[in-house]
Amino acid sequence: MMSQMPQQTALSRCPSCEEPLESGDRFCGACGYDLSAVPAPPGDHPTIAMNGGVPLPPDGTPGMPPAAPQQPQPQPPYAGSPPPPFTGSPVSPASGVRFDRSPEPDEYPLQAPDPRVATDVPTPPDGIKVCVACRAGRVDSDGYCENCGHAQPRERDHMEQDIGPVAAVSDRGLRHHRNEDAFGLGCAALPDGSAAVVAIVCDGVSSATRPDDASLAASRAASESLLAALPHGTHPQQAMHEAIVAASHAVNALAEEPATAREHAPHQNAPACTLVGAVVTSGLLVVGWVGDSRAYWVPVDRSTPPARLTEDDSWAAQMVAAGLMNEAEAYADERAHAITGWLGADAYELEPHTASFKPDRPGVVVVCTDGLWNYAEAAEEMAEVLPPDAAVRPLHSARVLVGHALDGGGHDNVTVAVVPFPAPPQGAGSA
């Protein structure tokens, strides 16, 4: 009879991830949890007696109040692979607003390594990438530590570049699971021997497929196009226009996938990003953009007013331009950041915006994604955050601006380039 069949003994389970364990396991094979650190199960001290009376405390002493129930111990952070990306519809049919929130957790803390494990692992030789958590384990080709199992920070989580007259910093922020921004910097010699400084900043559209690849491809194509055209005498404004077109072609090429790939992933859409760039010479300032990344002008003499040099390709900007809302009302709306222009194969029509200026005084151009200007939207706010010595310390200033966004919440990737005007003579750098 079924009731008389022997019952198989249930395997014990990992207290962290509930995976079954084998006899003699020291660590969980699924999440790496240290089973030697599992505390002994607490004694059974019910707070309500089965017969309705008041139970005795754990020491059996009458007249004492019952012991408080034990609080559940917090589980360690998940140490496995992150959950799959969001695959739902990125666009709301009602409002046209892109929804780019995915089910990843808000933050990805590193679990503290177990020193008893780390001490038994030999230090890898020079040239081998070492785990940032345990400082002892070797990192495999998939980006995980072979000792403690921790996923390693990606190279693009935080990037900095300083080439003298221009510097840029890009950070993943505090909420996103990866950095989808990218930038490109460079210096070129014009035909007359004077210098031209180039800065390109791109922001991947999170609701699109492979936004990080899109921003990287666009920033590289645009900066390479500018640095190739300027030495041949192309006017900086025309060179900027051509650079944006080149960036658009580079992003469009990412969407050219085999038909079989699209059949297996029908939810995917074309990679996309925004772009903003600046070219600074000894007497001319040129900006170009598509999307809602921005460029600001901040004079060295802070008694003179700063200015925003770009106009967003966004729903909010359209409402303001049409006179239907003032700026405060438009940007308070949930549709404010729905972009109306971007680089990508599914863009309606490519409309590169360019503008040229001849400032009559020295200053600094701040080229940034909305991850920064969301925390310093008005030109006056940006000028207040920018250090006074930004013209001679662009890298320090870029770090300060990124720090301001992170202190404000860091809800998006943050990328900023700081470009002093006028461009210094060839061979000169920042102090």
Image: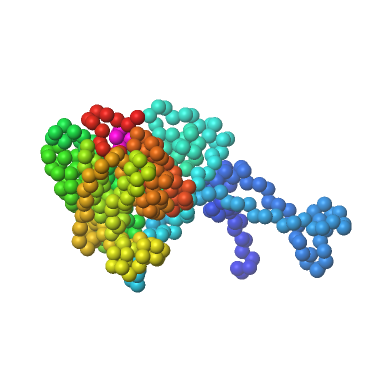
Instruction: Note whether 312 is above or below 77 in the view shown.
Output: below
Quadrant assignment for the C terminus: top left
Magenta region's main secondary structure? loop
Residue at the spot 16% in from the left edge and 32% down from the top edge:
193
Residue 188: percent from the left, percent from the top? 20, 36
Q: Position of residue 134 (x, y in %)?
A: 50, 36
In the picture, measured across the screen, residue 361 lies left or right of residue 411, that is left
Horizontally, residue 245 falls left or right of residue 312, namely: left
Query: At which x and y percent is residue 318?
Result: 29, 64
Q: Nearer the viewer, residue 177 or 133?
A: 177
Q: Residue 181: x and y, percent?
A: 33, 48
Q: Observer-nearest residue: 323 or 418? A: 323
User: Which picture quadrant has residue 158?
Assistant: top left
Q: Residue at x 70, y 55 (%)?
A: 70
Looking at this view, name the residue that lies furthest to the top: 126
Q: Is residue 212 visible?
A: no
Q: Residue furthest bottom?
A: 94
Judging depth in this view, the residue of 362 and 291 nearest the camera is 362
- Image coloring type: rainbow
The answer, for residue 321, to whether it is visible in the render is yes
Q: In the rendered image, which quarter contains the N terminus?
A: bottom right
Asked whether residue 410 is drawn in magenta, I would say: no
Span colored in magenta: 161-166
Rendered residue at 24%/56% (across/down): 344
Residue 364: image quadrant is: top left
Among all residues in the image, which is located at the extreme front?
A: 303
Residue 94, placed above or below residue 184? below
Seen at 26% across and 59% down, the residue is 341
